Image (cartoon, rainbow, N blue to C red):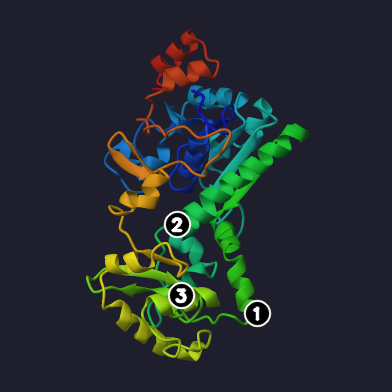
Amino acid sequence: MRGQGPLSGVKVVELAGIGPGPMCGMLFGDLGADVVRIDRQTAADLGIDRGSNKWDLLNRSKRSVAANLKMKEGVETVLKLVEGADILIEGMRPGVTERLGLGPDDCWKRNPKLVYGRVTGWGQDGPIAHAAGHDMNYIALTGALHAIGEKGRAPVPPLNLVGDFGGGALYLAFGCLAAYIEAQTSGKGQVVDAAMIDGASNLMTAIYGMKAAGRIVQKRGSNFLDGGAHFYSVYETSDGKYVSIGSIEKKFYAELIEKAGMSPDDMPEQLNPEKWPEYKEKLAAVIRRKTRDEWTEIMEGSDVCFAPILDMDEAPKHAHNVARDTFVDIDGVTQPNAAPRFSRTPNGKPTVAPNPGQDTAEALSDWGFEKSEIDSLKSSGAVL
C-alpha cells in the first residue's frame, strides 16, 4: 500500500507499543509512508482500552501484521521486512528488542541503511532508564510540569501532550527523518534515541531563556504565559463558558481595551506584574457581562488575539476548522485531519486503524514474501 503525500515510497516498520511510537507511525502514514505495524497476537495490558480499534486513532493510515515474536519464525518475518524498510520505530524499554533478536545490530545485518528509531520516557541510558513511567513523570523532571497550573494550586498535567506527543512522537519523527536524509548520502543507518524527557526539556528552551533573563518567576500563575498576566489568560463568560485572550503586544492590548468597552485609564500599566491581579479582576468582571458567543461576535477575527474556548464537540464545527478541513470523519469517527499541509504533494485522507493482523497477507506480499511463505508462516502460528 503506497499512500499519498510527500513520504510516499518511504517504508516503515513499527513495533507495536503505546503513545509516542504509534503517533510517530501515524504521522508517517498520514504523510504517505507505507507503515507496517507489527502487532501482538494477543492483547497486552498496556495503555487505555478504547473498546474498538477504529477508535485507536494513532493506528490509522497503517497496515497491521500480527506476529509471534516468541517464535523464531515470527522474528525472522520482521527481519525480512526490515530488509526492505527505510525506518524502524519501537517504544519498548531499553534492551527488550535486543533480547528478542530485533535490536539495531540484528537489523543492520540485514539492512545497514536502516534508521532505527527508539522512543522511551527516560532514554536508553541513565540511572532510571529501565524504570516504568508515563508522560506526567517524564515532564516532572524537566521543569515543565512545575510551571503549569494556577497560582497557589498544584501543578496540572497537560493531558499527555507535552511528553508523549510533543516531546516524544514529534522528536522521534523529526530525528528519524533527519537520520533518513543522512543515510541517503552515507549509506549507513543509525539509532535515533528519542527520550521524552529530552524532547520535553527541549520544548522548554524558550522558557529557560526567559528565566535566565529574569523575565519569569518560578511561581505558577504569576508570569506572562501561564495565566498570571491579565492580558494573557482565560475568562469565564456570563453563560459559564470561557474565552481566551492573548493581547501581549501594545497595539493588541489597546484593541482589547477598546473592544471590551474599557478606558485606557482602567488598566494603564500593562507590563507591571504588581498590577496584574487587580487588572485581572477588572477584566474578569467585564467579560462576565456577556456570553461567550457575544464576545466572539465582538472580538473574533480582530487583532485582540482572541478565541472562544471550544470543547471537542464544538471544535470540528467552527467555521475556520470547517473551511480548512482541520477535522475529518472516517468511518463515523470525527478526528483531526493529517498535518501539516503540502502544496505539491498533498496528503491523502487517513485510513481506518486496522484490527491486529488484518493486513498480514497483503502487506507481506507487497513487501516481497511469496504466497507459499506466507501460508507456511500462518500455519505455524508465526503470523496471523
Residue type marked 1: Ala
Residue 69 circle label: none
Q: Is residue 283 above or below residue 165?
A: below
Q: Find residue 361 and report its image quarter.
A: top left
Q: Report the quarter where the C terminus lies.
A: top left
On the image, the x and y values in percent for residue 200 come to 55, 60
Q: Are marks 2 and 3 in contact (CB under 8 Å)?
A: no
Dividing the picture into quadrants, the one containing residue 159 is bottom left
Q: Nearer the viewer, residue 248 or 128?
A: 248
Based on the displayed image, in which of its 4 quarters is residue 98 positioned? top right
| Residue drawn where x is 27% and y is 52% of the image | 313
Q: Mark 2 vs mark 1: which is more N-terminal?
A: 2
Question: Foreground mark, 2 or 1?
Answer: 1
Q: Earlier in the sequence, mark 2 or mark 3?
A: 2
The residue to which callout 2 is attached is 161
Q: Kindly identify the amino acid type of the residue bearing the numbered disc 3.
A: Glu
Q: What secondary structure is found at the residue carrying circle 1?
A: loop
* For marks 1 and 3 on the same chain, the one whose residue lies earlier in the sequence: 1
Crowdedness near tag 3: few (<14), some (14–19) or many (≥20) residues, C-alpha within 10 Å: some
In front: label 2 or label 3: 3
Residue 212 lies, in percent from the top left, at 65, 78
Identify the residue shown where x is 28% and y is 65%: 293
Please give the residue where the numbered disc 3 appears in the rendered image.
255
In this figure, which residue is indicated by the disc labeled 1?
213
Horizontal side of 28 relative to 190 (left or right) equals left
Classify mark 2: residues with Cα within 10 Å, few (<14), some (14-19) or many (20+): some
